Image (cartoon, rainbow, N blue to C red):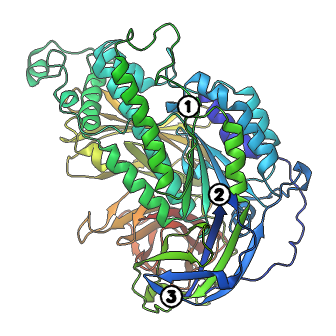
Amino acid sequence: MTRFSLIALLVFATLSVSAQQPPAQQPTFRTGANYVRVDMYATKDGKPVDDLKQSDVDILEDGVLQQVDTFEHVRVRTAPEDARLEPNTVADSRRMAADPRARVFVIFLDTYHTQIDGSANMRQPLINFLNRALGPDDMVAVMTPEMAATEVTFGRKTTVLSKMLEQETFWGRRGRLVDDDDREDLYKACYGPSSPIGEEMKARRREKLTLDALEDLMIHLAGLRDERKAILTVTEGWKLYTKSTTLEAGDAERRVNPGDVLFRPPVPRPTDAAQTQGSPRVQCEADRMALAQIDHQLRLRELTQLANRGNVTFYPVYARGLVAFDGSIGDNPPGTRGVTLQEDAANLKARHDSLRFLADDTDGVSIINTNNIDGMLRRIVDDLSSYYLLGYYTTNTKLDGRFRSISVRLKRPGVTVRARKGYRGYTAEEVSRGTSSSAAPSSAAPVTAALTPVVSFNARAQFRIRASAWGHQTTSGATEGALWVVGELDPQTRKLSAWSTGVQAEVALVGAEGQQVATRKIDVKPNEGAFLVQLPDAGGVPPGDYTVRVRLRSPVEGELGLTDTARVTVKEEGLGEAIVWRRGASTGPQYVRTADPRFLRSDRIRLELASTDTRPVAARLVDRNGTAMTVQPAISERPDASGQFRWIVVEIALAPFAPGDYAIETAQGPSRRLTAFRIVP
């Protein structure tokens, strides 16, 4: 599975680069605080309706009739591979995807919940979809639950994707006897290879990871553009687990009791692989308690609400087609593998119902109980090949930031219409800041053109680190640097018993040749959400590339539990990389360091950058397209206790900004630092 994930990540990096041609003249859509754009899909008897007029359509916002200002019918035609212009850069791909006349598709391959025969069954329909359905302006990407949404890259040419699907036919992981997953192997070691507790934990964890990935994708797509985004979800559905008192109770004979820790013989020091009776046992019990509390029925409802707010539509495809049983029959048909025929039928129904709900609640179409998957995919493509782009000036001019529902009515009988369900209005702060200013502050050093922010993180990590480097020239003329490492346990992980009484952190700095440069050990108190370590604690390191490794030990067992690594470069520049702080409802009136790049709109973000440069500092906030915001961060400075440098402090309130990816660009002389972060709902 690791091989497949790498292929999915690298697919678009290998696509050929085409020369960009100016687009044909198209009607221009207006923009502004009171202007709203709506994409509308009209069908009759399952076929697109192509001859609607502006006079046939009524748009209501919160029940109030609106005056349609612009009306355009878009008809997408398929195009050969060589007619599709490939984006040259990430910024190009985002610009192309933002075009309201381009369709945006994500093929989500649910590896965790698709059996091998299901993935093989989907091979040719997906290849046909890629090769026949896409138009010259369409953008497509592939994602799996093993990927983060920030790794999704959109492109227009699909040859490499098609070849990947031809070669990686058996990508499904459901039901595999041997799989490359350390955590699942840990459950087997803790509870036994055939334990129902370990099997249920494995299934619940896989379902959670899949829904986590879809939520991450929703946030990412919501910031891509306002118009509709389609997700072709290839899966065999989900059981949608809820709270389990049985799993919560666990196996009393196998559970770790206080007496086991207090009175047993000393445990030998482990290697990185650890031992079943050590920290893995603590991790298993912590996972068991957490997985017993999940409610994925509620989670799926919240996911569809998030999709509707971001104008995302799901088209789930049951990968195995028309089947009679939930599990693959093989050598162990239902009734002989510990699952009765009634239970198997209930499981299959639950999986189908989850896909129907996902489609119905996001205006999509589900492909279930049919072996004509190829034909149904054609129908979906036809459905999305003819649509209307409308615009109107809302009569509600309040700048309150509230959600406003949209409904579209047609005066022609018998026609079914699907359209954007609503949008969030602007606030006064958002209107005042504007979105088009790109000039650098005149009171400081000029800031060059902004880079596109790339927010890279694992949304499902229990522990994260962020490493910040700084280099400077000593009095002898040599260059040396230092690093600051911020480690942070996820808030939910910190509540678990294994980590609630504090942790011990082992920090190592490794050079480019694999040599260990510096190490530190610190004890982190239970009430400390994040900790800071300086490497080395005295002196400096030469410029170059380094790897930072942080390992946490549970105080319950005193053994290795969680790890994370980061790559960092010490440069010969006077301005260092930022240490990130947050302040919000969860922190009270004080700022706290953080390694998590996700922030709420109610938060404030603060950066601290080490500097020995005396030149003035400029800072600005840029959005996902690299466009500078009008609202400027506040800049100040404070001395460091060592007296070797001072801290440049940059901070800004996030309330005026919508969810999406942003970056704070800080410049001093020729040095420039871009610190990316994400605002989440």
- Circle on res. 346: none
Q: Position of residue 634 (x, y in %)?
A: 45, 81
Q: Position of residue 244 (x, y in %)?
A: 22, 34
Camera-nearest label, 3 or 1: 3
The quadrant in which residue 672 appears is: bottom right
User: Which residue is drawn at the image coordinates 76% and 70% (left, top)?
Assistant: 74
Quadrant (top left, top right, bottom left, bottom right) of the C terminus: bottom left
Nearer the N terminus, badge 3 or badge 1? 3
The quadrant in which residue 250 appears is: top left
Residue 166 against residue 388 in the figure, above or below: above
Front-most of residues 439 and 312 = 312
User: Which residue is drawn at the image coordinates 79% and 34% (left, top)?
Assistant: 163
Residue position for label 3: 65
SS at circle 3: strand
Front-most of residues 585 and 466 = 585
Residue position for label 2: 45
Camera-nearest label, 2 or 3: 2
Residue 128 against residue 91 in the figure, above or below: above
SS at circle 1: loop
Query: Quick check: 394 left or right of 297?
Result: right
Badge 1 density bin: few <14, some 14–19, many ≥20, Cα 10 Å: few
Q: How much space separates mark 2 and mark 3, taking CA atoms?
A: 27 Å
| Amino acid bearing label 3 | Leu
Q: Position of residue 96 (x, y in %)?
A: 74, 65
